[in-house]
Image (cartoon, grey):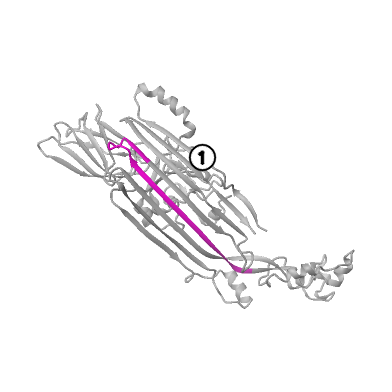
C-alpha cells in the first residue's frame, strides 16, 4: 500500500503579481503619482532593469541644453533617444542590462560616441559627455567601462556578471551561492546548509535572518514560500540561463521588495541579432572517492569488500538564442538535465540473534547479581543481563501462547547485524551503502519583442517548467527508496515597458508561479 503525504499541494497556485510605476517627475505630477503608488504599494517588487544618467558639457564645462542623445544596444539594436534639459542633464530609465553605444550631437559641436557602455542589473550608471567644438574635429570616440562604484543612489551591493558566473566554480550549480564572495554575506554551507530549517546563519546578510532575503527573477519574486531558505528560488535557475545578477545588501531603493534583508535581482539572458548557443556537461564519479570510515568497518567486519558509496554526478544541457526578426523579435532557450546516482551510509536497527530465536534480554536491577553466560537456556548472555527463553515467555503468557511464530518469521527476514547499535542486546545495527538516483529536468524559453522601432514599447515573456525527482534512502539493500520527493513547479513572467515621456516610465510585470511538490512513501 502506498501512502502519499502532501508536502506542498500540487494544485496550489501562488499568484505573484508585480506592477511598478517609477518616474522622475515634475511638480504637477506629484499628487497623481503619489495616489497611484499608494494604491499599488502592496504589489511593488524589485525590477531587473537599470538606468543611465549623465550630463552634457562643452569644453569649458558649461552645460549644453537640447543635445540629442541616442542609446543603442549593440547586440539587439534596441534604441532609446533623449534630449538634455536646460541644466545639460539627461536620463534613460528602465534599461535592460547589456552593452550599449551612446551618441550625442548638438548644434555647433562635434558628434561624440561612447562605445562599450555597460548597463548592469539594478546598478544605475553615470556617463558624463564632454563635447568638442565643431571644426576642430569631426567626431570623438570614447571607450566606456563598467561602473566600479554606484554614484547615483545609496544602495550597497555588487553585480555578478555573466563571465564571472561562467568562470567561477559553483559546486551545486546555484548561482546565488556566489553571494558569499561579497561583504556582509555569511553563507557558511556545510552543517548549517544541511540544518538550514533551524539554522539561520547560512545566508544571513548584515546580521539579518536568512529568511529575510528577497530573490527576484526578471523582476518577479521567486522565493520559496514554504521553507523560507536563504537565496533559494522556487524555479531552478541554471547558470547558463543567467545574464547577471545583483545583490543589494543595504540601503535598497523604494522599488525593491518587501523584506528587510538582501535584495537579489536575477536577469535571464535574451536573444540577439546573431544566433548563438552552447552545450555543456559536467561529470563526477566514484573512482577517486574515499569510503566512509564507519561503512568501511561494517563492510570488513561482515566479510564484504571495502567499497565506497556510489557517486555518479552528471549535469548536461544546451542553450540557443537568436533573432526571429532582426532588431525586433528574439528568442532564448535553455535545457538542463541533472542525473545523480548517489550512495550514502545508512544505519538501520535490526533484531539481534537472540531476538530472532525468540529470546529476550534485559538489564538486571542489580547488575552484579547477574553473572551472564547461559541463562534459562539462552547462551552468551552478557554480564549484568538476565534472559528469558521461549519456555519462560510462554509461562508468563496468561493464554499460554508464548512466542508468536509469525513474528519470528518476520524477524528472520531482516539482514544480519554488522554494527553494535540499537540497545546492544535485543536490537543491533546494520550499516550499508544506500543508493538513490535523482533526476532533474529544467526547460526555459524566453521571447523579447521590441514593439516599435523607437524602443519606447518592449515586451518579454519567460516560461519555465521543471521536473525534479529526489528519492530518499533505501530502507534496506535491494528495496526501493523509503520516500521520494517530486517537484514540478512552473512559472510564467510577462513584462511590458512603456516609455511615456523622458521622465515617466510605466513598467508592468506579471508573474504566475505554481509551486508544486509531493513526498510519497512506501
Q: Where is residue 20 in the image (x, y as percent from the top left)?
A: 42, 34
Query: Callout 1: helix, strand or loop?
Result: strand
Q: Judge from the rendering whether residue 314 lies leftward or rightward of residue 308; answer left or right.
A: left
Q: In the image, residue 252 lies at what x, y percent?
A: 43, 38
Which residue shows up at 50% across the image and 54% down it? Answer: 467
Q: Is residue 202 left or right of residue 398?
A: left
Can residue 182 be seen from the camera position used here?
yes
In what quadrant of the picture does the C terminus appear? bottom right
Left or right of 146, for residue 62: left
> With 410 as the anchor, is 80 left or right in this view?
left
User: Looking at the image, is 175 positioned above or below residue 135?
Assistant: below
87, 389: nearer the viewer: 389
Picture layout, residue 372 above or below residue 504: below
- Residue at image position (70%, 65%) is 422
Per the rendered image, the range of residues in magenta is: 431-459
Q: Position of residue 266 (x, y in %)?
A: 41, 46
The rendered magenta stretch, by its main secondary structure, is classed as strand
* Quadrant assignment for the N terminus: bottom right
Picture coordinates of residue 480, whole percent (x, y): 61, 64
Tell which of 108 and 202 is nearer to you.
108
Residue 147 in sight here: no
Residue 65 among magenta residues = no
Say if the magenta span includes residue 433.
yes
Q: Which of 332 and 84 is in front in this view?
A: 332
Q: Name the residue under label 1.
A: 15
Query: Count of labels shown?
Result: 1
User: Circle 1: is it few (<14), some (14-19), or many (20+) Cα within 10 Å?
Assistant: few
Residue ranking furthest to the left: 135
Q: In this view, does 397 lie above or below 322?
A: below
Q: Name the foreground residue: 324 vs 286.
A: 324
* Residue depicted at 44% across the width and 34% down the height: 19
Amino acid at each position: 500500500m502506498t501512502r502519499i503525504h502532501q508536502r506542498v499541494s500540487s494544485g496550489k497556485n501562488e499568484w505573484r503579481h508585480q506592477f511598478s510605476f517609477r518616474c522622475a517627475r515634475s511638480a504637477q505630477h506629484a499628487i497623481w503619482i503619489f495616489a497611484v503608488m499608494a494604491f499599488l504599494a502592496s504589489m511593488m517588487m524589485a525590477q531587473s532593469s537599470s538606468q543611465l544618467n549623465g550630463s552634457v558639457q562643452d569644453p569649458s564645462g558649461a552645460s549644453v541644453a537640447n543635445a540629442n542623445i541616442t542609446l543603442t544596444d549593440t547586440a539587439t539594436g534596441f534604441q532609446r533617444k533623449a534630449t538634455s534639459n536646460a541644466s545639460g542633464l539627461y536620463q534613460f530609465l528602465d534599461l535592460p542590462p547589456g552593452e550599449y553605444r551612446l551618441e550625442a550631437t548638438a548644434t555647433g559641436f562635434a558628434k561624440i560616441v561612447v562605445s562599450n557602455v555597460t548597463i548592469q542589473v539594478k546598478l544605475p550608471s553615470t556617463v558624463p559627455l564632454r563635447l568638442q567644438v565643431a571644426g576642430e574635429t569631426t567626431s570623438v570616440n570614447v571607450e566606456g567601462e563598467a561602473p566600479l562604484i554606484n554614484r547615483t543612489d545609496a544602495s550597497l551591493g555588487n553585480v555578478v556578471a555573466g563571465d564571472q558566473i561562467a568562470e567561477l566554480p559553483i559546486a551545486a550549480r546555484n548561482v546565488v551561492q556566489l553571494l558569499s564572495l561579497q561583504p556582509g554575506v555569511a553563507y557558511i554551507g556545510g552543517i548549517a546548509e544541511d540544518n538550514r530549517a533551524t539554522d539561520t546563519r547560512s545566508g544571513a546578510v548584515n546580521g539579518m535572518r536568512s529568511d529575510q532575503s528577497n530573490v527576484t527573477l526578471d523582476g518577479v519574486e521567486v522565493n520559496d514560500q514554504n521553507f523560507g531558505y536563504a537565496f533559494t528560488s522556487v524555479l531552478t535557475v541554471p547558470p547558463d540561463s543567467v545574464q547577471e545578477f545583483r545583490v543589494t545588501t543595504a540601503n535598497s531603493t523604494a522599488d525593491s521588495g518587501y523584506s528587510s534583508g538582501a535584495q537579489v535581482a536575477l536577469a535571464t539572458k535574451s536573444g540577439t541579432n546573431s544566433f548563438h548557443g552552447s552545450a555543456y556537461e559536467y561529470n563526477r564519479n566514484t573512482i577517486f572517492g574515499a569510503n566512509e570510515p564507519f561503512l568501511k568497518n561494517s563492510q570488513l567486519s561482515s566479510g564484504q569488500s571495502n567499497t565506497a558509496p556510489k557517486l555518479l554526478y552528471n549535469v548536461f544541457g544546451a542553450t540557443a538564442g537568436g533573432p526571429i526578426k532582426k532588431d525586433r523579435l528574439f528568442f532564448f532557450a535553455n535545457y538542463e538535465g541533472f542525473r545523480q546516482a548517489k550512495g550514502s551510509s545508512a544505519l538501520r536497527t535490526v533484531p539481534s540473534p537472540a531476538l530472532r530465536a525468540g529470546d529476550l534480554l534485559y538489564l538486571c536491577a542489580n547488575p552484579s547479581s547477574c553473572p551472564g553466560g547461559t541463562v534459562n537456556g539462552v547462551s552468551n548472555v552478557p554480564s549484568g543481563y538476565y534472559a528469558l527463553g521461549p519456555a519462560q515467555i510462554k509461562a508468563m503468557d496468561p493464554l499460554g501462547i508464548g512466542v508468536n511464530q509469525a513474528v519470528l518469521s518476520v524477524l528472520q527476514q531482516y539482514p544480519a547485524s554488522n554494527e553494535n547499535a540499537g540497545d546492544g542486546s535485543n536490537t543491533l545495527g546494520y550499516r550499508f551503502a544506500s543508493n538513490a538516483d535523482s533526476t532533474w529536468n529544467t526547460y526555459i524559453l524566453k521571447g523579447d519583442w521590441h514593439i516599435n522601432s523607437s524602443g519606447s514599447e518592449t515586451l518579454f515573456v519567460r516560461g519555465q517548467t521543471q521536473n525534479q525527482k529526489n528519492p530518499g534512502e533505501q530502507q534496506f539493500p535491494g528495496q526501493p527508496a523509503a520516500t521520494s520527493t517530486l517537484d514540478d513547479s512552473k512559472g510564467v513572467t510577462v513584462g511590458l515597458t512603456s516609455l511615456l515621456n523622458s521622465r515617466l516610465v510605466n513598467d508592468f510585470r506579471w508573474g504566475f508561479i505554481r509551486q508544486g511538490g509531493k513526498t510519497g512513501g512506501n
